Image (cartoon, coloured by chain):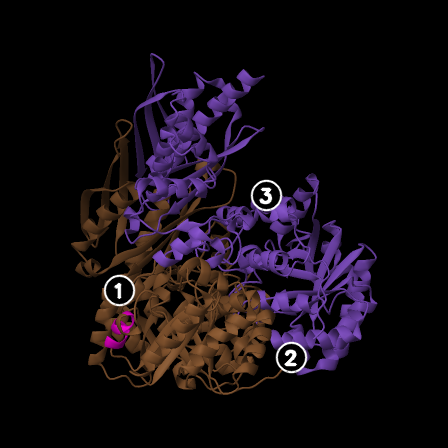
Chain colours: A brown, B purple
Amino acid sequence: MSVEQKAVVIYDTTLRDGTQGEDFSLSVEDKVRIALKLDEFGIHYIEGGWPDSNPKDKQFFQEIKNYELRNAKIAAFGSTHHPAQSPEKGLRALVEAGTPVITIFGKSWTVHVKEALRISLERNLEIIQNSVAYLRQHVDEVIYDAEHYFDGFKEDRDYALQTLKRAHEAGATTLVLCDTNGGTLPHELAEIIQETRKHFPSATFGIHAHNDSELAVANSLEAVRNGITHVQGTINGIGERCGNANLCSIIPNLCLKMNIPCIPAENLRKLRHVSRYILELANMPPNKYQPFVGRSAFAHKGGVHISAVRRNPRTYEHIDPELVGNKRRFLISDLSGKAAVKMKAEEFGIKLPEDDPVARSILLRIKELEAAGFQFEAAEASLELLIKRLEGESRKYFELLGFRVIDQKEEDGRPPVSEATIQIRVGGQVEHTAALGQGPVNALDNALRKALEKFYPQLKTMELIDYKVRVLPGREGTASKVRVLIESSDGKDTWGTVGVSHDILEASWQALVDSITYKMYKDEKEKSSS
Amino acid sequence: MSVEQKAVVIYDTTLRDGTQGEDFSLSVEDKVRIALKLDEFGIHYIEGGWPDSNPKDKQFFQEIKNYELRNAKIAAFGSTHHPAQSPEKGLRALVEAGTPVITIFGKSWTVHVKEALRISLERNLEIIQNSVAYLRQHVDEVIYDAEHYFDGFKEDRDYALQTLKRAHEAGATTLVLCDTNGGTLPHELAEIIQETRKHFPSATFGIHAHNDSELAVANSLEAVRNGITHVQGTINGIGERCGNANLCSIIPNLCLKMNIPCIPAENLRKLRHVSRYILELANMPPNKYQPFVGRSAFAHKGGVHISAVRRNPRTYEHIDPELVGNKRRFLISDLSGKAAVKMKAEEFGIKLPEDDPVARSILLRIKELEAAGFQFEAAEASLELLIKRLEGESRKYFELLGFRVIDQKEEDGRPPVSEATIQIRVGGQVEHTAALGQGPVNALDNALRKALEKFYPQLKTMELIDYKVRVLPGREGTASKVRVLIESSDGKDTWGTVGVSHDILEASWQALVDSITYKMYKDEKEKSSS
């Protein structure tokens, strides 16, 4: 097997193929912001959309002209011209997008020519040739995406090669081999690429892989090992069905493991930021297990792992997390020990000497709480407050005198009415108030905020962004313990808190109180340090 | 490259390495249920846990002995014996687990021997040899996991080979090469496996891959192509950091694409069900983009794709979704009514006579309920009742006149008091009663049973064996909708029901009412058929 390692250019299609993903859609403004972010990151090509079929995409190509890009070229995307139209008419919208690069796809697979296009095999070859030749009159770079190339090659290899030949002769500057259905295995892909490249010794080749077999990253790397120098994919692997090849994994594998020039090393540190930025704009939840950039990607749970990583991170980390802008984390869990608690306290800026009795009592308390069902992995604000409390340094901002929640259902078909009353003391003052809500937990939340905002107006800036309930294992049915996890934000920071009880309202109450207390503690800490 | 294609055995470590995953934890009952499901699916080995370090795992090995497995052998997992202990003492708990197979891991990488174990290289070899030899006195199969084998081989190849030699000579029946840190690329892995196998022509080899580089599936397949016949992984790829090799992708790739005997074809159709079952038990949300089993894996969005797939599914599907128990979906909202219903019908596996109005109204209702957050995957009793109801064949065993739940907390440190009152009508009789509970849901459950048992004494044989709550996606915080799943049993049968509401009490009420109604409906059905 010949292995060549030239520089690789990255072609991002998040704005085009990515938007075929279920639940992924972007406004024109989002698209512009993402394009600028990708340019800053060092991506070489950004495919913006289909100017022909989508008015939103057409607008994107207008808007993006107002910006000067530093690294990337913008590409407009479309298909070869319609069999019933001339190239001039069929491809006009693509040319009018005014981009320096145009990418078109054509059919490589006889099944598609016959059953989808319903034209003769020869007519398809003409269309490919005429489309590429026409576009080359208008732009210097025409990228030809050979749709279903690998399936086509397996079905009728000579025909698949002929489609490439026509595109190449007509002036296509890159021939992109697409595994459109995502079904090709890496060893098949390697053989087909080797065979194909023999016929086009001077051509530049690209790869476009889909993840239907969970092999898109492997296929892209295997393509590069076989001399391909142009890699298409999307940020976070978003795309139709199971998604496209994930650039957030391909780029660090190329740069850090295969030593192939691709994105500058200093930019690679922005990888996690780029990943998150796009998820935020699309309002999609991050996948915490995502390789390289996920929150769990360098999270260590087992006690043995934790102490080994503290001695030498190589023992359980394949790369230094900072190289991709990620962080090492130690998960406080029933599998971890004193070392983990010390590390955690250090993360909060609390130094615990090795034999400090406070450290030991914190560990015991955490173990006790974990045995009772608490879990601090996603509730570090609760953990920080707990450590402060056990160090004797916490402040109580308010005191509960009592609450009562009533949930009443009158008849089938109408939702119940939920009402909470609450009595708290702040300093010397007692506040007694009531609120309704959508369900009893919400009523309690509303009443608590109503009571406290009078004293602490800064709570108005804070909102609950996530609320999770988990029934703890056991066979107690409706009497089971529940764990409530709350995530809160004040626009600047985000923090997690936890509560556990047989009573879901009490568990929610605990997590709510920690969340509010943390907000006030955090504000004080910031004030005193500024 | 030599390519051999023998049958492959699958070794599942969901119950052990899987539980190292962040947010993934299982009760002993869950573990038993998962083991039975994996056995039924046709998995060859099930690694149950660490009997040495975890009391929960120890209990699992006791419980699972009460069942006769059809396909799988259970394996207990641990490490080579502690340097300061004898094999007899250090490995006793493993032997006492009483499993037919024991798996132990040992150190292959000099860095780990020196920095984590802090013993001499020679002592590590002795420990490996003595541990395997001791275990072989007690069980016929000892699987040796060579931790960090690929990193170890790169650092000091002779030493890595020596560790395997000692395990092999001491009688290890399978030598498993582990990519513990998940950093190895497929071509490196292939070279190391080829080189290693030359030294052990008669040994059986296994692969254990992690997904830190998004290459665990590719690495596992590449290992099989290089003569490895034992593949370790977890269902859904759950596991520490970015997870283990995903059996839900490896198995169909082996069976359907590489034609390697592994899981019987008829069982492969349960793949999606197995994937979902484990997520449901662990209360983890499914990843809709997951290859093969995800909800989007065969979902077609673009209009061109949809019409092509309707003509010939091969055009945009790498396999027939039914082979893995999945369904084709068309993501189009404005499709004509009849066609949409027919496609939806196929999704639910219901064969619809073209013009049956009842069947159509059932499907529309299911669609409506799903859009509102209901999910019938784990709640087939609710689905059956729903269909009966829409067919006009249901019986109402009781009618709700109203309920009121009060949850009152007096002061910090004491649990709240939960009381429910309920008014129902059975036939002509009204029952008004009250009960306390551990939390408001339990109070409601108690009051409902108290009211009904008077009329339906058979309800006394029925118990709730599981109660799960999931907050549905959205940013409504404590006002979010929740889905309640209940599993009930009367010692003979087990059934699941579901409820959805903004109010957790109302959602619980719906699921409770379905659960009780189903019990009575089921008893009647049995009586009339006997």
Q: CA distance from mark 2 to mark 3?
A: 39 Å
Magenta: predominant secondary structure element? helix
> What residue range appears in magenta?
A90-96
User: Circle 1 — which element?
Assistant: loop
Quarter occupied by residue B298? bottom left
Asked if marks 2 and 3 fall on the same chain, the answer is yes
Quadrant location, the C terminus of chain B: top right
Quickly name the residue at label 1.
Answer: A54
Q: Tell me if label 2 and label 3 are in contact, CB under 8 Å.
A: no
Q: Residue A492 is drawn in which quadrant?
A: bottom left
Quadrant that contains the N terminus of chain B = bottom right
**Relative image position of residue A298 (x, y in whole percent):** 49, 70
The residue located at (54%, 28%) in the rendering is B490
Q: Nearer the viewer, mark 1 or mark 3?
A: 1
The residue shown at (27%, 42%) is A403
The foreground one among A372 and A119 is A119
Q: Which residue is mark 3?
A: B33
Chain-order first, disc 2 or disc 3 = 3
Residue B111 is labelled as 2
- Residue type at mark 2? Val
Please state the chain letter of the residue tagged with numbered disc 1 in the rendered image.
Answer: A
Residue A180 drawn at (x, y percent): 46, 65
